[in-house]
Amino acid sequence: MITVDQALARCFALCHPVGTEEVPLRRAAGRVQREPATARLTQPPFDASAMDGYALGAIGAPGASYEVVGEAGAGHAFAGHLTPSQAIRIFTGAPLPEGAVSIAIQEEVQADGPRITLKKGAKPGDNIRPRGQDFAEGASLPVPRRLTANDIALLAAMNIPQVTVARKPVVALIATGDELVMPGENPGPDQIICSNTFALAAMVEAAGGEARMLPIARDTEDSLRTVLGLAEGADVIVTIGGASVGDHDLVGKVAADMGMERAFWKIAMRPGKPLMAGRLGGAVLLGLPGNPVSAIVCGHLFLLPMLAALQGLPALPPATRKARLGTEVGPTGPRAHYMRARLSNEGAVITPFDRQDSALLSILSGADALLIRPMDDGPRQAGELAEYIPI
Ligand SMILES: Nc1nc2c(c(=O)[nH]1)N[C@H]1C(S)=C(S)[C@@H](COP(=O)(O)OP(=O)(O)OC[C@H]3O[C@@H](n4cnc5c(N)ncnc54)[C@H](O)[C@@H]3O)O[C@H]1N2
Ligand code: MOO
């Protein structure tokens, strides 16, 4: 069986970046900007006041006094030129008038009719935001880049109303199994509710993709072939279940009959051993194991990095961090073990749950990390450093 790293490298080799589209800023959060956009103006476009107070025509020591000759507010410049003995009333965001060298905040000024007197000395440049201190016309964000809310604010300030982003990769999600019914339906006595597809759809959408939840494929070759046919046009086809060695595990066979070129099947990982990947028509096919937690863990380890690569971001494994084990852990054996775990002490300590059966969604829901136990690792003591993936 190949390792997790080898499997991920083969998954990346199947992923070619999707094309681009222009979207308005309001639709750009979470998308991957692919082409640079340059600032159409300099910010601030003028020297501006950072505080409410007085713009002074000259610096001054405590006791210096000035004649107040006008007023400037945000959006309302003062047209005149200050001489050294003059000041104007000024508010935050207002353009600095010509001749102004410093701004005294109003709390540090004694106002008396048309005159002010400084209570504290004023130095050159005090409380002034110089023109261009944020960015200059022509500046741009490095791309490719997944746009955060903060990036969107910067792009807006740059007067960029729309950006060129990766088209949303379309991910067709196909649950398989006669035992499955959708949430809200009445399961028969031998049936359960289809769950992991909902997690995967949420993960895809949070990662900038478009999830298409197809009808559940039943455990017949015909049903699976029909539903796989419905995935036409998707960039990624994710099947869930039917990946193992049982008589009803049909995904590998049916996909092969339909022309899938298989990149691998089975990896040295727990949960997720029966993972499969390949190309089917124009799509990448990722065959996830059916156990709810196995499918979702494989979603974190494989599907999300593949979605990033499809959007044009670097092909990288999930980011890992380190924490100290909160308890001793046993040896691992021939498969790497991704254990549901909880972080404590502000992320300094990681403790895996006792129960790790890959059917336990309640444990997954209580976890905020996957503790990575490498394959063939020995027992580890509490306090030793270990790697984990935040989830
Ligand atoms: N003899 C062997 N049996 C199994 C092996 C093995 O190596 N030899 N591997 C085990 C491992 S590990 C896993 S993981 C599972 C994966 O099997 P499949 O991918 O074929 O999944 P299914 O059999 O279809 O389902 C497994 C389990 O998960 C439930 N399920 C399936 N889909 C969903 C869904 N969308 N939502 C909720 N639950 C789902 C299904 O009812 C089963 O209980 O195979 C082991 N067996
Ligand atoms: O590998 Mo299975 O995914 O352990 O449960």
Image (spheres, rainbow, N blue to C red):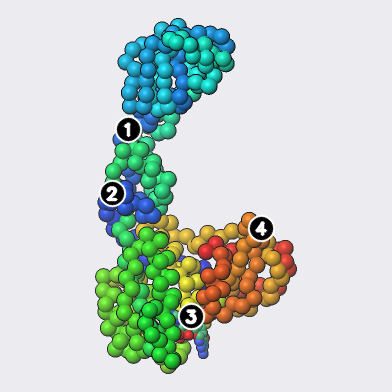
Q: Is residue 377 above or below residue 89?
A: below
Q: Which mark is residue 291?
A: 3
Nearer to the camera, 372 or 108 = 108
Q: CA distance from mark 4 to mark 1?
A: 46 Å
Q: Tell whether circle 3 marks a residue whose Cβ is less than 8 angstroms from ligand 2.
A: yes
Q: What's under tag 4, amino acid-wise?
A: Asn
Circles 3 and 1, Cβ within 8 Å, touching? The answer is no
Instruction: Estimate the x, y position of residue 358 in percent, counting from the top left.
Output: 54, 79
Circle 4 Cα neighbour tier, 10 Å, few/some/many (<14 / 14–19 / ≥20): few
Q: CA distance from mark 3 to mark 1?
A: 54 Å
Instruction: Estimate the x, y position of residue 46 in percent, counting from the top left.
Output: 37, 24
**Going from the N terminus, do you reach mark 4 or mark 1 first?**
1
Q: Secondary structure at mark 4?
A: loop
Circle 1 Cα neighbour tier, 10 Å, few/some/many (<14 / 14–19 / ≥20): some
Circles 4 and 1, Cβ within 8 Å, touching? The answer is no
Residue occupying the point 44% across, 91% down: 190
Examine the rendering and report whether any part of residue 265 can be seen. Answer: no
In this view, the mark in front (3 or 4): 4
Q: Which residue is mark 2?
A: 24
Q: Is residue 333 above or below residue 73?
A: below
In this view, the mark in front (4 or 1): 4
Residue occupying the point 44% across, 85% down: 192
**Going from the N terminus, do you reach mark 3 or mark 1 first?**
1
Nearer to the camera, 262 or 109 = 109
Q: CA distance from mark 2 to mark 4?
A: 42 Å
Circle 2 Cα neighbour tier, 10 Å, few/some/many (<14 / 14–19 / ≥20): few
Q: Which residue is mark 1?
A: 41
Q: Which residue is mark 4?
A: 345
Instruction: Estimate the x, y position of residue 52 in percent, counting from the top left.
Output: 45, 24
**Going from the N terminus, do you reach mark 2 or mark 4 first?**
2
